[in-house]
Image: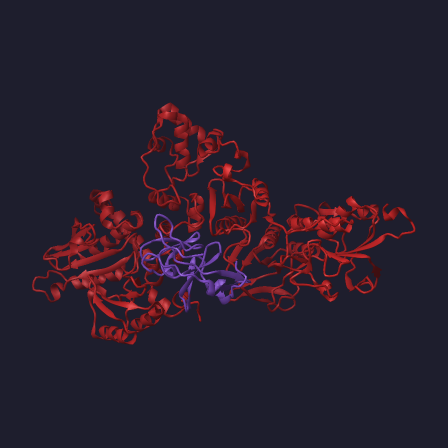
Amino acid sequence: MSTHTNPSTPRERLVVVGNGMAGIRTLEELLAKAPDRYDITVFGAEPHPNYNRIMLSPVLAGEKTFEQIVLNGRDWYEANGIKLLTGDRVEVIDRANRTVTAMSGLTVPYDRLLIATGSTPFIIPVPGATLPGVVGFRDLADVDTMLEAAARGGRAVVIGGGLLGLEAANGLKVKGMDVTVLHLMDTLMERQLDRSAGALLRHELERRGITVLTGADTAEIVGNERVSAVRLKNGQELPADLVVMAVGIRPNTTLGKAAGLACGRGIQVDDAMTTSDPAILSVGECVEHRGQTYGLVAPLFEMAKVAAARLAGGTEAAYTGSVTSTKLKVTGVDVFSAGDFTGGKDCEDIVFRDAARGVYKRVVVKENRILGAVLYGDTKDGGWYFQMLKDGTEVAPVRDTLIFGQSFGGEGTANPKAAVAALPDSAEICGCNGVCKGTIVTAITEKGLSSLDEVRAHTKASASCGSCTGQVEQLLALTLGDGYAGEAKAKPMCKCTDRTHDEVRRAITALNLKSIPDVMQRLEWRTPDGCHHCRPALNYYLLCEWPGEYKDDSRSRYINERVHANIQKDGTYSVVPRMWGGLTSAKELRAIADVVDKFAIPTVKVTGGQRIDLFGVKKEDLPAVWADLNAAGMVSGHAYAKGLRTVKTCVGSEWCRFGTQDSTGLGVKLERMTWGTWTPHKVKLAVSGCPRNCAEATIKDLGVVCVDSGYELHVGGNGGMHVRACDLLVKVETEAEVLEYTGAYMQLYREEARYLERTAPWLERVGLEYVKRRLVDDAEGRAALNARFLFSQSFSQDDPWAERASGSVDRHEFAPLAQVG
Amino acid sequence: MDQSISWITVGSVEDIPRQGSRVVRTAYGDIALFRTVADEVYALEDRCPHAGGPLSQGIVHGARVTCPLHSWVIDLASGEAVGPDEGCAGHCPVRVVDGAVQLGLAAFRPGRGGCGHG
């Protein structure tokens, strides 16, 4: 017999503190199980009935009204006999007398108490944080404040590039404000997204006109009466009429703590959702369960179910923690993330990129089970992955097609060819040239095409950036069946991609790709961040293509180029100061000798390129060694670089009785012009003063041999593993011509050779005739190449030693993190 | 992980560049701490099992590092060389607590060519 049927037994009194999603979901569940067990009173600090807090973003964006997000109107409370007290915050829990007292002074007794006070936005404790015009993004009042501000227009600064911050930013942008998002980390939503997905998201937001500043650390909120600007730690100041703080939430434990309940980060509950006081339960964002707190809705509902079952008298229901997933509620931006996507030991990454559709998917699998997933652009399979993740489903049987999603699961038909076959004729295959599937298929059948080159020639498909090459090949195979023999495949860059170096370079230019993650996304890399083969190559290609614009990625450089010294077999480094044209002076030699003494440098050697090499320098001594060499006027010799190394010279007409021209002086000029450049591989130049060729100029990447009537330019030589003597490129009459040819030759090599391809194999691959055609026959082209070279040089001739010796660049490279024991 | 491990805080995650490495000098020799693009942190003996190259100076990609001397690729989690090469750099228990990187140095097992990790 249940208690309520007996009027002599009063019903138990249940008081709920908090009229939010967790508290009311608990009541819904409870009413379904035991509709008449309790006399229920609900206190809500906000003046509204229960609404769907996670839909505040659409309200802000104007996509929904408040009425549309109300979950339970006042009539629902009435119909269920629940006493609802809104706009009245509970301030005291008297556990001894089992009563709660609200702000209004109202005191209500309870038999069971449910605390569901949720969380409060974390406000970063910077000066000005309490100024009017600074809001969190938590409740309807915040949304109203933001809407009012947006109605006046002006600038909004959103601090925090997480889920809430981006939703706020999007809403404010839609409402017509000029919006900047400040994010401390360098990836947006870094807790939910990996770098690739974060980069896509950033592009999309920027496309919508939202400015995104990453690595932005707020120092102060500026303003007198109200907020006027946000100042960053780097000194940058951003004018602001509204500042939204969305850097995170904190469980609201004020009430629980004051009542003496056990609290950690949240109010601590056991698996029955009971606090340290058996009469009091707690659910939602205010609780800490097994050390975890939650800020997403799914766990709250799971907690609500358990709390309701316990309140209904059950003894079995237990909450054991939640695995969570996230979606971003910004219309038109599909982002999904679940579980642990960081990977790690024994984890495999399955990565899918469809550049044309802007889709990125990454599923992390460990021991044949899904550990996490990040989806961008196409999230329809998010739920499927998430269910398998939660269930620990064995994915081995669908492993091959897992990344294509549920519709392919189990059918075993998933392959890229089938995907292309399924496309309608109107589907665009080649974005660069606007060629659709039907056009390609028609061309293949009607014109009898049988190779990629023919398709390129007739339709232009795949003829520009080449990112659709795979699809065009599949169309060839589909249309011709066995009649298609496939292409004689050029070698891909590395295992991360099917694309060749040349295809990647073309795509960087054609698609305006400006960062390594951009390239990896658009060209559908199979790994999250490449490997030691492709990353240095991509870094170089981007640096070469976008001089002055692309920021060098030192993490994609080999150690020598990262620390600007040569690593040796024992882990020490060698240092080579630049000596222009091989010249030095007593002052420089003295400085070198002093450095050798001061840092106990064990070996000093003259190099094959006429420079002095100091061996055995400890890494942490490098900045000090450089500082001393810099102080004597010397700069880095780039002896470690895929760049210009040395210009070797003989003494020429100044001293030599056979010398025909000033070979040393010309060498100095060449070195002054070419130093600091980045090239596909190392580059060595030389100038010999007469055909006796004492500087060995005819086995250099470019060698000048001075003769009575002028200068012979020799190219493509190599004194390395495969000795190759130069080819004669041209004979010119003036030093100015030598300089122009050198700049143009360097630039042609920079723009067209593959990374790690020296000039000798490059020249053999493209042919001397080709290089002559570009440099000798085409004076205009030569001048343009030289101009591009000099433009690029205007950004690259900084001494890397000076930058590092000053401590302003890469300081972390040269000091251990810690000394222990 | 072994409850009895005593953890020593050596710095914060932010001190290690993403896709980069920092070295901790210890009585057991240098330990290289790596931070991946996904912000995982790993700790290995700073010696390639092949020729003793300082792994801390290599290029970090995925959860692997390529030794700067002869381009052996080492798995950051296990310290093992990725096939076809064989050898192990040995690894040290490491964890991140509230952004602080902690080493379980007493449980560190050096590599010495053949794999000695636990």
Q: Is residue A333 visible?
A: no
Protein image colouring: by chain
Residue A464: percent from the left, percent from the top?
Answer: 37, 39
Q: How many marks?
A: 0
Residue at the farthest top position: A446
Residue at the farthest right position: A8
Which quarter of the rendered picture does the N terminus of chain A lie within?
A: top right
Residue A171: percent from the left, percent from the top?
Answer: 62, 51
Residue A474: percent from the left, percent from the top?
Answer: 41, 32
Using the image, determine if residue A70 lies above or below residue A451: below
Give me the residue at 49% from left, 29% from top. A424
Left/right placement of residue A113 relative to residue A323 reads right
Q: B48 and A549: which one is in front? A: B48
Residue A275: percent from the left, percent from the top?
Answer: 72, 59
The purple chain is B
Which quarter of the rendered picture does the C terminus of chain A lie within?
A: bottom left
Q: A446 and A40: which one is in front? A: A40
Q: Is residue A132 visible?
A: yes
Look at the image and give the colour of chain A. Answer: red
Q: A491 and A146: which one is in front? A: A491
Give me the residue at 14% from left, 64% from top. A651
